[in-house]
Image (cartoon, grey):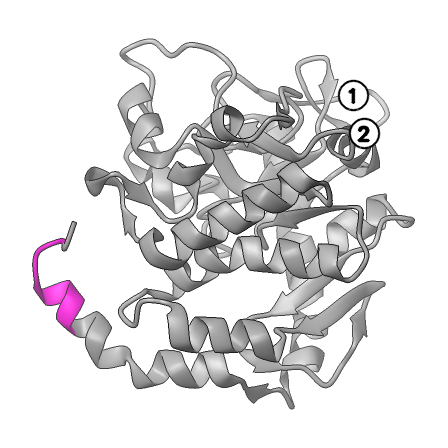
Amino acid sequence: MISAKSHSPCTHAAIYLVDREPEVGEAAGVEILRISDEIQRIVSEGFPKDYSWAEVCFALKPLLIEAELDRGATTAAYIDSDVFFVSDIAPTLETCSRHAVGLTPHYLRARTPQQQPSELTLLRAGLYNGGFVSTSACPNGRAFLSWWQDRTRRLGYNLPRAGMCGDQRWLDLAPVLFEGTCVLRNEGLNVAYWNMDERPVTMSDDGRFRVGVTDMVFFHFSGFRRSHPEEVSVYAATRKPTAANQHLRALCRTYLSAIEAAGEQSERVNQHAAPNAIARWYQANAWRRGVRRLRSPRF
């Protein structure tokens, strides 16, 4: 979110700490917020007790978007912590404000049987990426959030072969069920290891990162490791997606520098932050996750 704020200074940005009670309320112009007592209660009383930490975070997305709308936002977007902005998000949010829901697809072009990840993998993971989801404070937007909350709260497991992929598979239904859902087809949104073959990273003469002739807005560094930045993502290890492109290498270096610089901000926020009710609930149910790992998938 710090990268988003740096390119969009007039856009409100907030970071929610899922498992801590922060004492610091701001970092680099970004608001640092605690999870409300009501959301903490919903998690500790209503989430499946064998959810992994990733599944907890998946299921929190609609609750956090709703929290921002309740605070007065007319349009709010959930953004993953591994999303890195290289240009202004404001025009995209302006587009989103005219629609109930905004989604970014994993791909924009048909795949050949040889391309990886395959279309079957895409279908198992979901057509849309949950790293960026926008919702407006209109009736259909609110209805979508209520519906999405209900599904992820009960069926937000990360079991792709059983038809679930956290929050993402449910997004496939949004364009059908909720009028006003917009599929954002801008190639500069949600560039990532899974679509780099159709969106090669380039750089303009004035130093702007681009995808073809389109200015890149954000790159989703899913699976990025600071120790191996040349691999782009650990999740695509079978393809060994090295940053062979000089412009992609430059982007990786820029991101690595940004997360290292953000380390001091993170330490300042977290050094005196106490665990909250979600952290205590999660720790108390560690044995349930152990049992889940030992048995066959439940769905």
Up the image or down, 111 lies above or below 126; here it is above
For image coordinates 60% across by 41% down, the residue present is: 133
Quadrant hosting residue 87: top right
Asked whether, in this view, residue 235 is left or right of residue 64, the answer is: left
Q: Is residue 23 visible?
A: yes
Check if residue 294 falls in the magenta segment: yes
Q: Which residue is labeled 1 in the image? A: 204
Residue 141 image offset from top left, x and y in percent:
64, 40
For residue 207, the mark is 2
For image coordinates 36% across by 42% down, the residue present is: 235
Label 1 SS: loop
Asked whether, in this view, residue 62 is left or right of residue 24, the answer is: left
Q: Residues within 10 Å of mark 1 (few under 14, many from 20)?
A: few
Q: CA distance from mark 2 to mark 1?
A: 5 Å
Give the amino acid type for the residue marked by disc 2 in the picture.
Gly
Q: 100 or 50: which is nearer to us?
A: 100
Up the image or down, 23 lies above or below 250; here it is below
Residue 89 image offset from top left, x and y in percent:
78, 38
Label 2 SS: loop
Residue span colored magenta:
291-297
Residues marked 2 and 1 touching at CB (< 8 Å): yes
